[in-house]
Amino acid sequence: MAMGRIYVPGDRRSRGRSKDSRDRERESRTLQATIDPAAESGGEAPRPAGPALLLAGFALLWRRPWWLVALIVTLSGGVAVSGYLRDDPRPLVLGQTSDGHRLMERSCASCHVPWKRPDAARCADCHQAELARDHHAATKFANVARWGDLFERLDPRDCVTCHREHRPAEMGFTAAPAICRECHADIAETAPDHKGFSFDGCLGCHNYHDESAIAPAEVARRRGEPATRSPSPEDWLAPSPTRVPPPASPPAPDAPAEILRTAGAAVAEWGASAHATAGVNCSTCHTGGPGRSGDGSGWIARPDETSCAPCHDPEVNTYHRGRHGMRAGTLGEPLAVRDPDVRLPMRQDAPERQGCGACHGVHGLDLERAQVAACLSCHDDEHSRNYESSPHGRARAAGRADAPTCASCHLVDHPETDPVSGAPRRVTDHNNSFTMRPAERMLGEVCSKCHSLALGWSAVRSPAAAQKNFAWHPADPEVERYLQMVDDRTRARGGRTGEKEDRR
Amino acid sequence: MRRVIPCPVPSPRPRALRLLLLAAGLVVPSCGERVDQAQVSATRAVDAIAQTVLAHRKSYAQAVVERLGEAHVVTADEDFQVRNTLPLPAQFLRMSAEHVARSPVGDQASFALISDWAINRSNRPRSEFERKGLRELKAHPEKPYRGIQTVGGRRYFSSLYADRAVTRACIDCHNAHADSPRHDFRLGDLMGALVVTIALED
């Protein structure tokens, strides 16, 4: 352990020095020996330095007790801060995260693996539904023998190539706007109707991940449809059975007697609900689901969605994928309505808790309320406040059974087959973010059921129209141009063109 | 950066050549031996993969798509996931290719369908090797086009095989699709190529 050259017998630099100088050197050597035992022997034989260092440290602290106090304070502070940051590392978050990821800032491990970059597999843990119809899926570039040269410039298999987090950007897109040029530089040759277009504007019409609603083939197919059609019974707009007939005689509630003494109102609500009709009793939910009900031991006073999941697994699973439930699903911690991480404005009198019961009611299972009133009891943004005065809201107020509600657009229904009984059923996708990003997904999943592509696409592309809850819809020249290009291609092949009539 | 060495296959350094191939159950041993022997082994390997892939697609096209379509049980459709129909034979092959690409041998062996008239632009030729191979196949479809190319700093032995319209589902889709650059395919026409590639390890 070399601590600097102090004195070496016979060293030419030590010769001819004064006695004082030699004394100082000796003293220095003695002090050095305390720190470095090798110096005592002229650095010839290395000895274990640990114990000596420890002793030296104690000696130093003994002579200067303030250092000891400072050390204790520093260590204590460090332990306290690290404990605090382990529970809530948000003070360490660099920059501003995207709206969705902000809800996950309490857990860096949601995205980060220690000492590694976030990889696409980590992203897919949460975004698998959005990536189910990915036009640029990583699997398309898996053939390295065909695509390996591209990876030297950009790697489309890696989400962070285009989406670098911790920096604000629309849709989290942080790549250069003209990134499409890397692969589509010859677009004007292969698609002559694109001649003169700027690569900066590709994403104005196209969606990199999911173009299923606006792909030319899909547009051509829809443009050929002869007329507007009303929603079919299989469509999401068909009147849903919002009220299951109450049972003629409710079964006896099986909650413990001491709980039933103060639960008269809850029992009455439950007795008129679909749960009572289906034979779902108090213990089914309050003890954690079927198979765990029984004698009332382990009573859960306020069941959360984990009690609903055994019977409503698709709904709970998708709920955990959306903004409403992602924190509960990932961190096991329900998101409070007025949590500081929520960026949308919320009503001051909004209920504190989120969960199945917040929208559906705890005992009454009011599906009617879950479609609009429950949303408006929390959301206080302009889009939400304008619903009731919008054409959709007015149609609903007028009693039209197929009038769109908040849930119609944000929680879409999908027909499925019951895996147990094989019977057809409708499952409501409770991922409330699914149709929001990209907006074209709402066009395909929702708007196009009744509206023309021109109207629907123009509407969802306009933030101003969305704020007004689509009380008006601007004509979008880019949409018109896109549809015209598809029509031209269809005509060139001798096909039919034409737009559906708008359904008012 | 692609560097293409066209057919006939030049000899890679014999001492360093090793063909890693597991997909067809063939393992070509490390060389240090005669170069032509390595070429023969590589050719046999890619031929075996090509025949396996095309046989799977033909079986699927005839025994599943055509048979169930004629019986009006279920049709094949490009949007098979949305419409709960069968995938088209070309999509079936592409899915197989993606499974192989994600498998442990994915960086050693791969295959893909390419065409000058591909609906999906990513399936059009990406390199001069593929462009020249398609030109050669149009002139001599019975003769596979082979060569070694360097892609992303790695050397590959590739072979292109003529791909013909094997079922009506192929030509019906390509002839009607809005994104298709050609709409006059007939059964038996050359539609593109199956390209099979194995990695050469230095």
Image (cartoon, coloured by chain):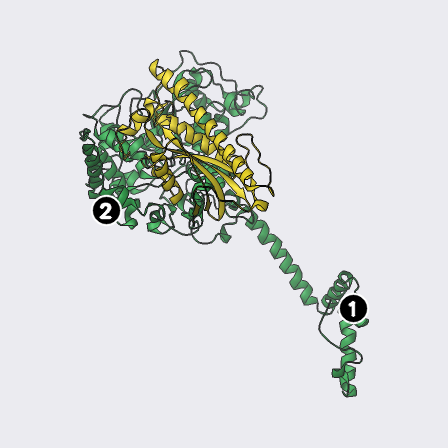
- Near-viewer residue (A275 or A30): A30
Q: Quadrant of residue B184?
A: top left
**Residue appearing at x 51%, y 32% in the figure:** B44
Q: Quadrant of the C terminus of chain A?
A: top left
Q: Secondary structure at mark 1?
A: helix
Q: Position of residue B154 (x, y in %)?
A: 50, 46
The residue closer to the viewer here, A373 or A91, is A91
Please indicate whether residue B67 sits to the left or right of residue A498 in the image. right
Kind of residue indicated by mark 2: Lys
Label 2 belongs to which residue?
A195
Depth check: give the residue in front, A177 or A248. A177
Q: Which mark is residue B22?
A: none
The residue to which callout 1 is attached is A38
- Which residue: 47% across, 36% down? B110
Along the line of sight, the residue nearer the viewer: A278 or A230: A230
Colour in which chain B is drawn: yellow
Answer left or right for A244 relative to A148. Answer: left
